Image (cartoon, grey):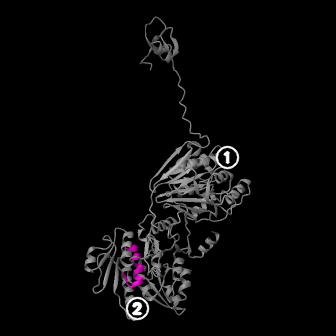
Amino acid sequence: MKISKKLLALGVSFSIAISNVSGVHALSSIEEIKGRDRYETAGMIADKQDYNTAIVVNSHKSLADGLSASGLAGVVNAPILLATDNEIPYETDSRLIKVDKIYVVGGENAVTPNIEHYYRRFGIEVERLSGNDRIETSYAVAEEVKEQLELQGKKIDKIFLTNGYKGEPDAMSIAPVSARDNAPIILTNGQSIPFNAKDIDSYVIGGKTNMSDNLVQDTKSERLGGTDRFDTNKKIINKFYPGSKEFHITKAYNLVDALTGSTIAKNTPIVLVHNNSDKSILKGATKVTALGGIDESIIQECINAVNGVVLSGNIEVHFINVGQGDATYIEMPDGTDILIDAGESKYGSTVVNYLNSQEKGMDLDYLISTHPDADHVGGMQEVFKQLNVKNFYYPADAPHNTQTWKNVLSLANTEGCKILDSKPGTIISGGGATLKFIHPTKDYNDNNEDSVVGLLDYNNTEVLLTGDAEAITEQDMVSQNLVPDVDVLKVGHHGSNTSTTQEFLNKAKPEHAVISVGENSYGHPTQNILNRLFGIGSKVWRTDKNGHVIMTSDGNNIDMKSITGGPQTKPDPEPTPPPTVDKIVYANGGSSSSNKYHKTATSHGMKGAIKMTESEAKKKGYIACKTCF
């Protein structure tokens, strides 16, 4: 992974390998073209083309003028590179300096006028295509497309009309078709166009909210529009790429990569993707390439869609009570069995018995060690002896020389399981759910900080499993944007003050927080950590008080419960009611025949008052004086 990180920093295209439990999926990886930022990604896309002309657009604030660039890119065989309003990034400049001609799409407020002066000094022709606004700029681009086609003895045979202010996703969906067919994208106000589009195939891209029926009728266009950007995208693909088996995918709400990628994706459709978006169009694909950085959960959804995986069944996460230690059992929707850690040696049989209670004679598909501390790996000795373990993931770089850890590694080797390094980015999948190792991404000097952190994802349910990860690890995960909003958090290091920082919790925002803890001399979980969890509204579950804690989810709804088991649990005691104090009262012991008791010995002129408790007075038939009480 260290090598991969360095390569990624250099913007190298790579594939994500997916650990495929069932072994039946046709596609197990998606190629990514991804740089450190949009500028480098655009440059990497350009490097996949042979070109001597380039197009520059502004992508700093919005695509605006650049929305219409794809058609021209197709005609002149040019990549689309990115600039800001006042800067040409190195990733763009290093490629522009090699070309013969540069088209600048947009006015001087969009792309700095210095671009003309600078590149003309090197003998490079620079032509700016612009208008008073993005709509007029699209006209200028269309006119250049027309002129370039005429030079080639061709003419425009189709145009695409989109809303210049609300139709950005529609323009990006049609961009590869525009590049392929040398067809201009004309931006409109959604109501009309100031020219005649007769004798040419015209397509209105977008639904009725963005593009009016009048515009469709006036231009005699065919509408390709749906209920949202995803529906429109699907209609475009079905129209222009029927039966396609190769696709490019890009983020649905950050569309610049779709624009720059349109120049290489023109012979394959671009699919807009997002969490839980409709990806059925990908089913049966033989190749999928991701343009730009796309979340791993979305990548996995795409792989599931390609392979026809339908989410069905429940996922279960069992936080097994092993005292002051960790043991977490996961049953994926397809029955894949995963155990993360196994507590101390003395609780090995507890873990094995618990697993057998779930499935007698369980074959454990994956055993995962987060780090080599005894309270996490000791019980693995019994697990290896009693169960058939197929795959063992462990942090190969974690230093530890205890006899317990040596015993675990020895058993892993002798029991014949596959031994794997738990590298970040590894994904275990089963039944539409994924467990991804997201950390550590660098070496630490402490085993706790080196803990393998896993993110379990099943549709709309996410569980973050942190081992004994401490504050520095949490800080790194937050800074690398690796901490999503989760439903359940396995609290780090048994609720120690060294973990579960406020910054980390503010990112994770768990609805439920599970603390695996037992009798200890460290004060775990500390009141400080409990207060933080309560402060963000988390419901706290503790194995020392609740026993085994179980989460079940169908991918949308979660259920949490606990059952007694494991080391003696210590539920919060019922509050002791305050002692009842029997009031002292006074009854008349003189000649009076009064049957009342009073507050003081002299009330109502009593003589010879008799002191007694209120209960005694009631037993003797006295009643309370309404004046005194």
Q: State the residue in front, 126 or 515.
A: 515
Amino acid type, callout 2: Gln
- Residue 164 in which image quadrant: bottom left
Q: State the residue in front, 135 or 143.
A: 143
x 44%, y 85%: residue: 73
Q: Position of residue 34 (x, y in %)?
A: 54, 74
Q: Residue 158 got which mark? A: none
Q: Residues within 10 Å of mark 2 (few under 14, many from 20)?
A: some
Q: Which residue position holds label 2?
A: 148
Work out whether 390 lies above or below 601. Answer: below
Q: Position of residue 270 (x, y in %)?
A: 43, 75
Residue 130 visible in the displayed image: no
Q: Residue 346 got which mark? A: 1
Work out whether 191 lies above or below 580. Answer: below
Q: CA distance from mark 2 to mark 1?
A: 79 Å
Amino acid type, callout 1: Lys
Q: Quadrant of the N terminus?
A: bottom right
Magenta stretch, residue numbers: 167-185
x 55%, y 42%: residue: 564
Magenta span includes 75: no
